[in-house]
Image (cartoon, rainbow, N blue to C red):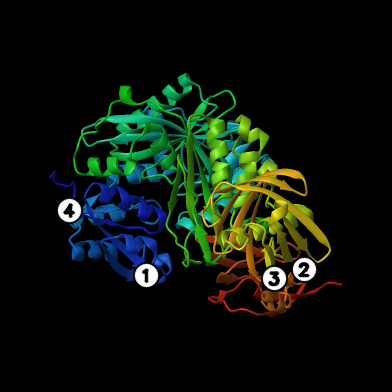
Amino acid sequence: MTKPLFSKLLIANRGEIACRVMRSAKALSIATVAVYSDVDAAAPHVLMADEAVHIGLSPSKDSYLLADRIIQAAKDTGAEAIHPGYGFLSENGSFVEAVQAAGLTFVGPDVHAIKVMGDKIEAKALAKSAGVSCVPGTDGAVSDIDEAMAEAEKIGYPVMVKASAGGGGKGMRVIESATDIADGMRAAMNEARNAFGDDRVFIEKFVVKPRHIEIQVLADTLGNAVYLGERECSVQRRHQKVIEEAPSSFISEETRRAMGEQAVALAKAVQYRSAGTVEFIVGSDQDFYFLEMNTRLQVEHPVTEEVYGLDLVEMMLRVAAGETLPIQQDDISPKGWSIEARLYAEDSARGFLPSTGQLLRYRVPMGEGVRVDSGVTEGGMISMFYDPMIAKLIATAPTRPEAIDKLRLALDHYQVAGVATNRQFLSSILADADFRSGDITTGFIAEKYGDAFVAEAPETALCENLAALAACFYCRGQARLQYDDTVQMAFVAVLKGQITPVHLSLAHMSGADQVMINGNRTVRVTGTLDQPVSKSGILFDGTIDEIPVAIQIDADDHYFTLHAGAYSLSLRLYPAHAADYIEYMPEPQTVESDNVVIAPMPGLLTAVMVAAGDRVEQGQDVAIIEAMKMENVLHAGTSGIVVAIEAAIGANLNVDEVILTIIPDD
């Protein structure tokens, strides 16, 4: 038996990326060690590992960001190497130094590459020296407003102010004209200081109609480096990627080669090893400019793996063990198309605010060319402490249109209950004509959707018809509708938050199911099922009220997901007597008024900027609530006098909990 690369690997992360790294490690016969916080004690990555070590309290600063505890866990369990995943300590040079000082192997680049590429100003200078095309901008940090205005005039508006130590969209502002530069600079510097403890910013040209294209590189310790084509990551919301694909429908072979060669040149210039990503901004004329280099595994790496047939985590482990890259540039060519959608626990109708709670139902889609990278399970919690991503859903097919259709169908089959998700938002993007044609930029979501997405409700008649159909299927699955039997059954269907009584009366001898809805309308359902209703993936082919219908149904435990044309509806059937209780349950009340400031999500109240008796103006910043790694600034809804502060700084608030009240001017 071949000796494994490492006997034991500790994964210094959580969630889906921890599970993802473990899968590759186990395939290489490497034992795995998980680390976990209080809230993650029963998380999937903990259960998947061969060993698990508790490292602290639920907040990441008290657990996953504690380098000394993670290194001690590796020592205590006999792990030889540490894989950081992404986020947390993955690009922390001090952590890498501590890992190596402890005699352990860090699965990633060395300290030099991380530190140089982690500072955008140093990274840009090195990129220029390596012959990489860079966006016109300042050579160093700018802190003086007058200097900033002078530099912006040289570069030409619009410009982008960016935090030197930034990432994830923090400390970034687009400045359209000279009148906006002062406010934009101050805002970017304050945000950078709060997020990174470093308020240095620089200015560069803002590319019009930009696309975000990144090149995956692999390099070993012997100086060999290759690029694995590009990923299109232009569909973003507030600088956070939403949909990613490989390859790009926009990039020509000539541009791909030029970008790839420059990415490899940069990797060699910084003496890079392991997997890394060089990000570019690309204009409508395919001119491209260096943005940054991410010295870690990217969230969107699966689309590259699917198109190029490589396991990037395996490559990282082999390089860390001192092996030579097993591939050369001429060996690399794409096959097919792969698209990834990030499924988040967030309420798109409320400005995409994070949603927390228990996953009452969690069922993932399956099928050829469908991949789900997830770190949650049914019954688990989406907590306020970490990023709200539930999973990455990846679809791969021979062509881009086929991959889009497969991904959209897979989204339709994703079943999540207990928290709000962006599933319908993602499906809407995939159905958009401009997206399908490849006409996208980094402003796609802002231009199409603004700050929120509210799904259109299907017509009432369609909802009722589908509820009737589900009731029929349930009865057939229970073998209660046979031959010439007449069956009387009653249900309560809960669909789109509405309660629909469904009274079923079937005379099978007529070849149809007669379903009474609300006691005043009869729906006639006739058709066939291609498999028993207890199985998922049922296809109904027939008619509802003589209208031809082809519907895909997933059914399990009285829970149905029905896919009819453009509609995807989740529905739950309950016994009829449940109506006696459901009918009288009060509707959730939302405390929304201009004279109160409420918590828009569960989170930690970190600041209140006003006191009782203060005067505030409409739109004024009054409080900050922190949840899921994000700070959310809350504003006064009206002008007036603050009459009371209802919540204390440091309090963990629930949704709609009142923070302060205002007496309006009038």
Could you tell which of marks 1 and 2 lies nearer the N-terminus? 1
Kindly indicate whether the residue at mark 1 contacts the one at mark 3 (C-beta within 8 angstroms).
Answer: no
Residue pointed to by mark 3: 597
Task: Give coordinates of residue 278: x percent, y percent.
Answer: 41, 36
Q: Disc 1 vs disc 2: which is toward the camera?
A: 1
Badge 3 marks a residue whose secondary structure is strand
Could you tell which of marks 3 and 1 lies nearer the N-terminus? 1
The residue at 72%/76% (across/down) is: 586
Please identify the quarter of the rendering in which residue 561 is found. bottom right
Task: Give coordinates of residue 144: x percent, y percent.
Answer: 55, 47
Is 368 placed above or below 39 here? above
Give the Cα distance between marks 2 and 3: 8 Å
Badge 1 marks a residue whose secondary structure is loop
Query: Could you tell me if residue 182 is visible in this image?
Result: yes
Give the Cα distance between marks 4 and 2: 60 Å
Mark 4: amino acid: Ser
Mark 1: amino acid: Ala
Check the picture and name the quadrant holding the C terminus.
bottom right
Give the Cα distance between marks 4 and 3: 54 Å
- Report whether 551 appears left or right of 252: right
Give the Cα distance between marks 4 and 1: 24 Å
Could you tell which of marks 4 and 2 lies nearer the N-terminus? 4
Badge 4 marks a residue whose secondary structure is loop
Mark 3: amino acid: Val
Kindly indicate whether the residue at mark 2 contacts the one at mark 1 (C-beta within 8 angstroms).
Answer: no
Task: Give coordinates of residue 525: x percent, y percent.
Answer: 72, 52
Residue pointed to by mark 1: 41
Residue pointed to by mark 4: 7
Check the picture and name the quadrant holding the N terminus.
top left
